[in-house]
Image (cartoon, helix red, strand yellow):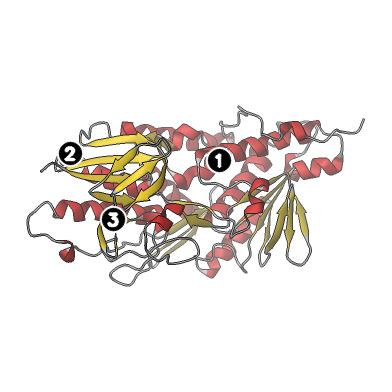
Amino acid sequence: MGPRRVLVIGGGFGGLACARHLAHHPEFEVTLIDRANHHLFQPLLYQVATASLAAPDIARSLRQVLEEAENVSVLMDEIETLDREGRQAIGQSGRHYVWDTLVLAVGAQTSFFGNDAWEPHMMGLKSLEDAQGIRRLVLSNLERAERSEDPEERRKWMTVGIVGGGPTGVELAGAFADLIHRSMRNEFRSIDTRQLRVVLVEGSERILEAYDEDQSEYARRRLERLGVEVKTGTRVADVTEGVLHFQGGEVLEARAIIWAAGVEANPLTRQLGVELADRAGRVTPLPDLSLPGNPDVFVIGDLVRMSDSEGKAVPGVAPAAVQMGKHVAKVLLGERHPGNLPESRPPFRYFDKGLMAIIGKNAAVVKSGGLRLKGYFAWLAWLLVHILFLIGFRNKLVVLLGWSFAYVHDQPGARIIVHRPRDARKEPVEPT
């Protein structure tokens, strides 16, 4: 009998953690498949979008991460079909990947809550391509405003609308305000970058709802001090080209609209043959993270909606995904020994490491157990944790040096526009 074939779909935090913990165990033949060739440190994705970091700073080749694991193969493909009966996955390439054990860790994607017609008019933030696209669009809009002679058109080019007051939206808003209002204030001659409007829109009554009320209020005050307009209790009714329409009839004209309001599970969960746990397409596995009635299929990360064995709700954050990936590897390693059956598998226990959100330079909020921080010391804690969690010494060093330089000089260096936005030729003719 040969080694157990473990197919891990998804090279994010959960999938990579599982593969790394099965590495160097010849009892397992692990195949890790991802549609990209790199692992992405998503918590810093907004810094690529706001020109604080370059794309390679927060990504690392999956092959490089796993190069010393001889029992792990890395393949670049996008899985489109799961054949549970045949125990195989079919990729976009047409190749069939057979498994003895499947670990599904494909993560989440941007959700427009059923309003798919909005998608062409906004940009999400889930990949390096998204982040580079946002950066390209905002910087290009400033260039258009600089050469425009129409004050009304200039105002539209210099407006950024961000929908969603969670950590992603708050961090984007704060970083854009820092970048444009302070770092680029002396670089243009025809426009005053302090007039750039960054508008953060949240449907509920406060931003950062998962945090304490005083932390949410602190974040709001801090954003407003940076020049961000915060609109809470404001729901989007429609999105058309360059315009956000709100319930009640108010509109916001913005040439850059960013959607940070929601995500949904990868559609592959709908092929698992189990009932979905919510409208976002997530599933609820058994306590060991396997599917009911199918002990050889595990689901982890953003695909999961569950409480752990101690009743704690498991959030869709990177530390939870890592812990899930390690747990599945632990279960599989335990079953190397005769007599260890699925019925005796240990349940997953989630260790809550807390929540963090940064709000521009020198400010953040931290909520971890009984610890509550806000301000400068929370910002330092945020920096330390994110440096520690980055994969690879090079990435840690480059990001640390980049942050240090930007802190001292207020000059993020990743502001090059490589490709113009796809709608660059649609620019209106300026009056003569």
Instruction: Looking at the picture, tell me which residue is in the foreground, 211 or 310.
Output: 310
Mark 1 residue type: Ala
Give percent across and percent down for residue 287: 27, 66
Q: Is residue 377 visible?
A: no
Query: Which image quadrant is residue 222 in?
Result: bottom right
Instruction: Looking at the picture, tell me which residue is in the foreground, 152 or 411.
Output: 152
Q: In the rendered image, which quarter contains the N terminus?
A: top left
Q: In the rendered image, which quarter contains the C terminus?
A: top right
Which of pointers 3 and 1 indicates the residue nearer the eye? 3
Mark 2 residue type: His
Whether residue 330 sits left or right of residue 242 in the image: it is: left
* Pointer 3 or 1: first along the chain: 1
Determine the residue positioned at 80% across, 33% down. Answer: 190
Q: CA distance from mark 3 to mark 2?
A: 22 Å
73 is higher (above) or lower (below) than 232:
above
* Pointer 3 or 2: first along the chain: 2
Residue picked out by circle 3 = 297
Q: Is residue 213 visible?
A: yes
Residue picked out by circle 1 = 131
Give percent across and percent down for residue 87: 28, 49
Query: Which image quadrant is residue 393 in?
Result: top left
Q: Secondary structure at mark 3?
A: strand
Q: Secondary structure at mark 2?
A: loop
Determine the residue positioned at 46% across, 48% down. Answer: 43
Q: Residues within 10 Å of mark 3 (few under 14, many from 20)?
A: many
Determine the residue positioned at 43% across, 57% down. Answer: 270
Residue picked out by circle 2 = 24
